[in-house]
Amino acid sequence: MTASQVQTTTATIASAASPQTRRPLVVMDSVSKMFSSGTLALSNMTLTVNGGEFVSLLGPSGCGKSTALRIIAGLGDTSSGTIDWPSSRINSKGLPEGDISFVFQEPTLMPWQTVFGNVYLPLKLRGISKASARNDIMATLATVGLRDFADAYPRELSGGMKMRVSIARALVTKPKLLLMDEPFAALDEITRQKLNDDVLRLWKDTGITVIFVTHSVFESAYLSNRIVVMKARPGRVHADFPLTTSLDRDAHYRTSEEYRQACENVSNMLLEAIGGEEH
Ligand SMILES: Nc1ncnc2c1ncn2[C@@H]1O[C@H](COP(=O)(O)OP(=O)(O)OP(=O)(O)O)[C@@H](O)[C@H]1O
Ligand SMILES: [Mg+2]
């Protein structure tokens, strides 16, 4: 199967309500990134992510996934090309104010602050008092199952709980776009699956748009309704296809034929992107 054939192959698992018909939230147009070291991390990367999509971004190590995410978040400049936010109000830095949150692979919590204090940080940076932030913080902690741990310190939490705090900190500002860079890579499989279900529930409940970087074919096929596979040296989009299903994404889906087929499609695309043989 080649990149051009994948649209046809996945049509069998795509529903009529294609996410492609939604309004564009962020548009990367011919973005290139050359670091001062001379590394061309991205070359003419073009990608439109629509409101409400759950997009998984896969590709070989070093193909520019984190660079692309950082550029979308405004954490790095482009060398050429543009990032546009057609449906957002833009601030003086060219970013949609308050609309983007980032979750990294490490939870990066402040050890001297409680769970409450860590989730309060982004609101504190906006000058919101603790008293007026309290309800939003407690509601967000409830959505990640940590309402009873508001007064705990990071050292008292498991790896999965720390990651939930990191997700709560990202969600407390009610962003439109959640960028996640291999958030669960360091966790054991069962915790990872539970957090996958948490993120899916949050996505469904809030209508948030997610761009999720992962190396896991299984994780991407479980979570996303769209897959973007990148190629390396230089980084650019190799394949971009929908991955929708009529089934609920739950334990039953994990053993379904649709899921197996989705995993095979993603896996073949990834093999193609790294220059290997397809199955
Ligand atoms: N700050 C930097 N300065 C110079 N080169 C960089 C910098 N950050 C990334 N690179 C280079 O840019 C390329 C893309 O890196 P990036 O971290 O975006 O890849 P990635 O796809 O996220 O990889 P991984 O899957 O290993 O996380 C790599 O060749 C990397 O060495
Ligand atoms: Mg990376």
Image (tube, rainbow, N blue to C red):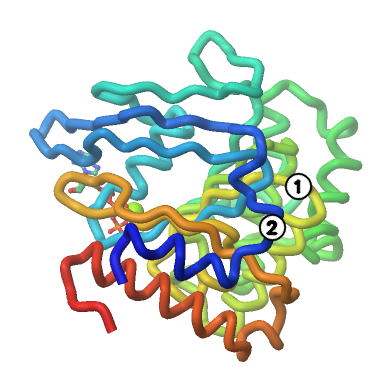
Which residue does the numbered mark 2 point to in the structure image? 16
Give the image location of residue 271, x and y in percent: 26, 72
Give the image location of residue 173, x and y in percent: 72, 36
Asked whether, in this view, residue 236 is left or right of residue 137, the answer is: left
Are circles 2 and 1 on residues that touch, CB within 8 Å? no
Give the image location of residue 22, x and y in percent: 66, 40
Q: Which of the 4 image quarters holds residue 4?
A: bottom left
Give the image location of residue 33, x and y in percent: 24, 32
Q: Which of the 4 image quarters holds residue 12?
A: bottom right
Q: Identify the residue at image location x=42%, y=39%.
A: 47
**Mark 2: few/some/many CA within 10 Å (<14, 14-19, 20+):** few
Q: Is mark 2 on a helix, strand or loop?
A: loop
Which mark is in front, 2 or 1? 2
Asked whether, in this view, residue 2 is left or right of residue 138, the answer is: left
Identify the image quadrant of the N terminus.
bottom left
Residue 49 vs 59, above or below: the answer is: above
Q: Identify the residue at image location x=25%, y=31%.
A: 32
Q: Disc 2 marks which amino acid?
A: Ala
Which residue does the numbered mark 1 point to in the structure image? 207
Name the residue at the left extreme: 38
Identify the image quadrant of the C terminus.
bottom left
Q: Disc 1 marks which amino acid?
A: Gly
Pick whichever, 144 or 42, lies toward us.
42
Q: Identify the residue at image location x=26%, y=33%.
A: 44
Asked whether, in this view, residue 165 is left or right of residue 66, the answer is: right
